[in-house]
Amino acid sequence: MTKATARPRRQPSMADVARTAGVSAQTVSRALRDSPNVNPETRKRVLAAVEQLGYRFNNAARVLSSGQSHTIGLVLLQSGGYYSRSAVTAGVEAAAGEAGYAVSIATIARLDTGLMERSLSKLADQGVDGIVIAVPLISVTQKMEDITRDIPTVTLDGSRTASARVLGIDQKEAGRIATQHLLDLGHRQVWHVSGPDEWIEARQRREGWQECLAAAGIEAPPPLEGDWSPGSGYRQGQVLAMIPDVTAVFAASDEMAFGVIRALRERGRSVPGDVSIVGVDDIALAAYCHPPLTTVRQDFYRSGAAAVALLLRGAGAGDSLVTASLSIRESTAPPRRS
Amino acid sequence: MTKATARPRRQPSMADVARTAGVSAQTVSRALRDSPNVNPETRKRVLAAVEQLGYRFNNAARVLSSGQSHTIGLVLLQSGGYYSRSAVTAGVEAAAGEAGYAVSIATIARLDTGLMERSLSKLADQGVDGIVIAVPLISVTQKMEDITRDIPTVTLDGSRTASARVLGIDQKEAGRIATQHLLDLGHRQVWHVSGPDEWIEARQRREGWQECLAAAGIEAPPPLEGDWSPGSGYRQGQVLAMIPDVTAVFAASDEMAFGVIRALRERGRSVPGDVSIVGVDDIALAAYCHPPLTTVRQDFYRSGAAAVALLLRGAGAGDSLVTASLSIRESTAPPRRS
DNA sequence: GTTACGTATGGCATCGATAACATAGTCTCG
DNA sequence: CGAGACTATGTTATCGATGCCATACGTAAC
C-alpha cells in the first residue's frame, strides 16, 4: 500500500487523480466523461490513477457546477394496501437507473394537499431534475404550480396541472373490460365497489363501469365506496349480501374483491354460484386464493418506466396509455337460471 | 419588483436574498438554519425577502460546503412478491424524513453480488450519509467492505459485514412461535415450506422451526423450499398432498401459505380439517381469504424506522430486535382424532 | 509558405452555501 | 472605568467539478 495513512479519510479529489496521472484536473474530468478529444493513452493513465486512488467523483460538486442533479423525485403514498405502489416504484427506478438517474422518494402518509406540497418542496429542495407523482392529485395549489413550472413533472393519474404532463393507465378501460365480461356472461346487472372518491383511478374505473352499463341500456345501481383495503370490501360485501338480486360485482381492487367474497360467503352466497366477482390488479395471490379471482391486470411497472421516459425524453413518447387485459378465473360464471 | 426581468429564470441565490434584505449572505445562511445569534428583527427581514423572491436553497451547494448530504440510501429488491418491502420503505422514509433526511433508493433485480456492488457504488457516488440494506447479503466482497467502511450501513437481516451494524426482526422467533402454536394444538409433526436459502430470514425461520421441534423431541422432516411466491407454495403444496400423514404446515410467508392451501384443497385435503397451516407476515388479505390465515405478524415498518434511528443516532438505540406476535385465525385447528 | 483548422491539453473563473476568522457594539463585574 | 465575555454581523477562503477560453502542435489547403 503506497497510500499514506496520515490523512485519516479524505476522499481523493480530481486534483489528486490529476497529480498522480501527471495531467491537469480538467483532463481528468474529460477523460472520465464523454470527451471526444482525449488521447487514449492519456485516458488509460487517468483511469489507472483513478483505480489506484479509489477515486469516486463528488456528486454535489458535479451537480453544483453542471446544474444537473441527475436525480428524479418520486412521490408515493404510504398506504401499505395499495398494490400498484411497489410495481410503479420498481418501474421508475429501473428506467431511471438505466438512464443514469437516481431516484429520491417522498412518501406522504395520506392524501392531503398540505403533505403533498411539503413533499414537492422537499424534492425541489433536493434539486431533482424531474418528478413523478404516483399519487392522485386531489387539488393543485399555487405552490404546487410554482414548483411544477420549474421542474418537469409527470403524474401517473389522469389529473392535470398547468405544466405537468399526464401519463396514466387507462382506468376507464379497466372498468369497461370488467363490466363487459360480466355482461357477456349473461348478468343483467353489475354492482360496483369503488375506491375512494379522491382517487382519479377510482373515479375512472367507476365511469368505465357506468358507461359500459349505459351502453347496454342498463341503469347503474349506486356504487359502494371502499378504501382499497380488504376490510372495506368486506363491509360493503355485507351490504351487498342483504340485497336479494345481486349476481355480479365489479370491485375496484383485488383486495376489496376478496373482502366482498368473504362477506358474501359468510351470508351463504356462493361465489361464483350465486354471485360473480371481478377485481382489478391481478395481485400474485389472485390466482391462488379461493376462489381464484377473475381480475383486470395492468402493467404498473411499465407505466412507471414510461413516466420516466416521458420525463427524460421530453414529450413524444407520451400519451400512450398502458392498457389493461382480463385474466379470467373461477370467480366469474354465468348467472344461475332463474 | 426591483429585480430586472432580463434573466429568464435563474433561481435566486442567497446573495440575492441578502441584497434584498440588506444583510450579508452569511447572515441569511444563519437566519435560515439554527443560528443562536441572529436578531429576531433581522431574521424577520430575511424571511420576508426569502418569501418575496421565492428563494429555495441549493442542495448541491449546501452538500458541497458542509460535507453532509442529509440523504440516506436504501437498497431494495425489485421482486414484487415480497410483502415486507413496502412496509420497510415506508418506515425508513418516515424516520428519515422526520430527521430531515432524504431517501434515495437503489433497487436490485435479484439477489446477485455484482448487482449489489453496483447499487452500493451508485449510492456512494451520490454521497449518501448512510445506507440501509433491506435485502439479504449473500456474500460480502472487498468492494462492499470498502464502501461500508466509509459509509455507516445497517443491514436489516442477520448478516454481518465488518462495519455494518446489524438490525433485524428476530426471525428465529417467528419460526418458533408458529411451530409451537401447531404443537400446542396437538399436532405431532410440523412440516415446513421455507423461503429461498439465500435469504437469512428464510434460514432463521427454518432454524426456529427446527429448534422448536427438537425441543419437543421431534425429528424435523426435510424442509421444502419455495421462493416466497404463491406459485411456489402451490407447487410444494402438491408435494405435501402426496404425503399421507401431514397434518400441520408452517409456511415462511403468507403468500406461500395460500399457495399450499390451494394445492391441498385441490387434492381433497381440507384446511384446517385435515391440515393446519400457519404463515408469516400478516398481509392485509390474510384475514379475508378463505380460510382466514393464522400467521405471525412482524412490524416491518418499525424495523425500517429503527434502522434509520440506528444509523443517525449511532449505536445505542440498536440491537433491539423487533419482535413477532401470532394472529390466530381459522387455518389452524387441533388434529382430527385418529 | 502562410492561412486555417482540428486535436489534445492547461488555466482560471464559477456554481451557491458554509466554516473559520474578523470586527464592531453591548454588557458585566471587580 | 477598563478588561473580558458575549452578541450580531460582515469578509474571505473553501468544498470539487465543470464551462469557457487560451495555447501548443500538427496538418491540410490555397
Image (spheres, coloured by chain):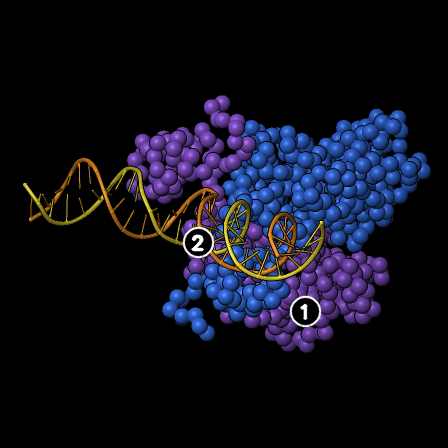
Chain colours: A purple, B blue, C yellow, D orange
Expressed as whole percent of the image width and height from the top left, the position of residue A135 reads 61, 61
Q: Quadrant of residue B173?
A: top right
Expressed as whole percent of the image width and height from the top left, the position of residue B117 reads 55, 35
Q: Give whichever of A97, B206 is nearer the camera.
A: A97
Q: Image check: A7 left or right of A36?
A: right
Residue ID for mark 1: A197
Q: Amino acid at mark 2?
A: Gly
Residue ID for mark 2: A67
Q: Chain of mark 1?
A: A
What residue is drawn where x is 35% and y is 31%? A22
Expressed as whole percent of the image width and height from the top left, the position of residue B196 reads 68, 35
What residue is drawn where x is 66% and y is 68%? A198
Q: Image check: A335 left or right of A55?
A: right
Q: Is residue A74 visible?
A: yes
Above or below for B289 versus A214: above
What residue is drawn where x is 65% and y is 59%? A108
Q: Secondary structure at mark 2?
A: loop
Q: Give whichever of A37, B277 is nearer the camera.
A: A37
Q: Give whichever of A70, A62 is nearer the camera.
A: A62
Q: How many marks?
A: 2
Q: Image check: A59 left or right of B302?
A: left
Q: Give whichever of B112, B336 is nearer the camera.
A: B112
Expressed as whole percent of the image width and height from the top left, the position of residue A10 reads 52, 36
Above or below for B115 versus A200: above
Q: Amino acid at mark 1?
A: Asp
